[in-house]
Image (tube, helix red, strand yellow):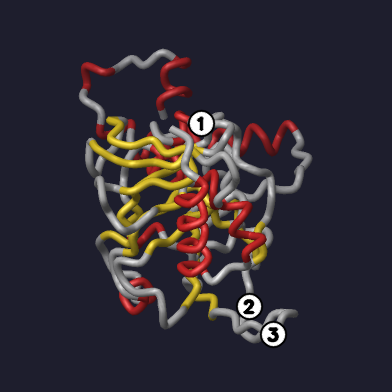
Amino acid sequence: APLRSSDRRKLKQRVIATYNISPEIGDVLVPEGLMSWSEVRFCSLISPYQVAYLSPDGDPLRFSIEKGADELIPTVYTLWKKYHLLPCITTPAAVIPVLMGGADLMIPGVVQVLSSQTMVPPQLVAIAQYNKDFPTTHGPPLAVGHLAVDLGSLKARGKGKAVHVLHSWKDCLFNVGSKVDHPEVLVEIREVGKSNEGAETDHLVQPSHPAPPFSKEGECHLDPCDDVALTRTEVSMILCDAVLQAIRSTVKSLPTASFPIPVGTFYSSF
């Protein structure tokens, strides 16, 4: 149902106070014509009953885990309107489909995190894709959840959960809306120091061994090698070495009944 003007103003002031944003940004995040969607059952790993606020176009902008809950959690639709609304943790692209499947973000999957005194569990954080080629940037937020451990545990690169994921791109709540693809943008990570407006920024914590690059589709790949021109003799020598290596390492352990092995099977399997 459409939200009353007085309720919309209260919600807007609440969002402005919570995130310390300007009234103009508040109008963007809490637009005119906002609709409430309460006591609706939809797919969730947390609770079957939730309350959501929808834009005039039908995109869910915020939701709560339980009826009457004080915390209103922004969806990725909202985070795409204000990329720095929540502190952001980055993860390799191969992890994103796992999160979309309902998994939580584990500590080994964290690549970057902004070090801030205010980032304490169970604070809301966004999760975005790590960008190896431009490490001072990251992709748009693709998931949101509660921070599960303190920054010391993240820096220590231990085991366990880093973020309890509540919502992600392409989950059931996302699919209530327009189901648009995520923005093709690189979001700048603020470095240590002060921004142009004089606001303090956060420390950027990265592991000593950055993750390899990942494609947009979430497939891991290594940096492409330069083209190398080989002669026929060199190709034959490489193939011969590969065959001998296969025989010495794996084929010799096969039972006698496995022989003879067709050439096609040998090349495809070993």
| Label 3 close to label 2 by CB (< 8 Å) | no
Q: Position of residue 242 (x, y in %)?
A: 51, 37
> How busy is the neighbourhood of tag 2: few (under 14 within 10 Å), some, or many (20 plus)?
some
Residue 29 vs 250, above or below: the answer is below
The CA span between labels 3 and 2 is 13 Å
> How busy is the neighbourhood of tag 1: few (under 14 within 10 Å), some, or many (20 plus)?
some
Q: Amino acid at mark 3?
A: Gly
Q: Nearer the viewer, mark 3 or mark 2?
A: 3
> How busy is the neighbourhood of tag 3: few (under 14 within 10 Å), some, or many (20 plus)?
few
Give the number of the disc on residue 191.
Answer: 2
Instruction: Residue at 40%, 35% (x, y): give it.
Output: 173
Q: Position of residue 38 (x, y in %)?
A: 33, 37
Q: Amino acid at mark 1?
A: Gly
Q: Position of residue 46 (x, y in %)?
A: 24, 44
Marked residue nearer the N-terminal end (1 or 3): 1
Judge whether residue 212 can be spotted in this image: yes
| Label 2 close to label 1 by CB (< 8 Å) | no
* Location of mark 3 (residue): 198
Marked residue nearer the N-terminal end (3 or 2): 2
Judge by depth and name the residue closer to the eye, 3 or 178: 3
Is residue 186 toward the left or the right of residue 203 in the image? right
Give the number of the disc on residue 177.
Answer: 1
Q: How many marks?
A: 3
Marked residue nearer the N-terminal end (2 or 1): 1
Judge by depth and name the residue closer to the eye, 16 or 127: 16
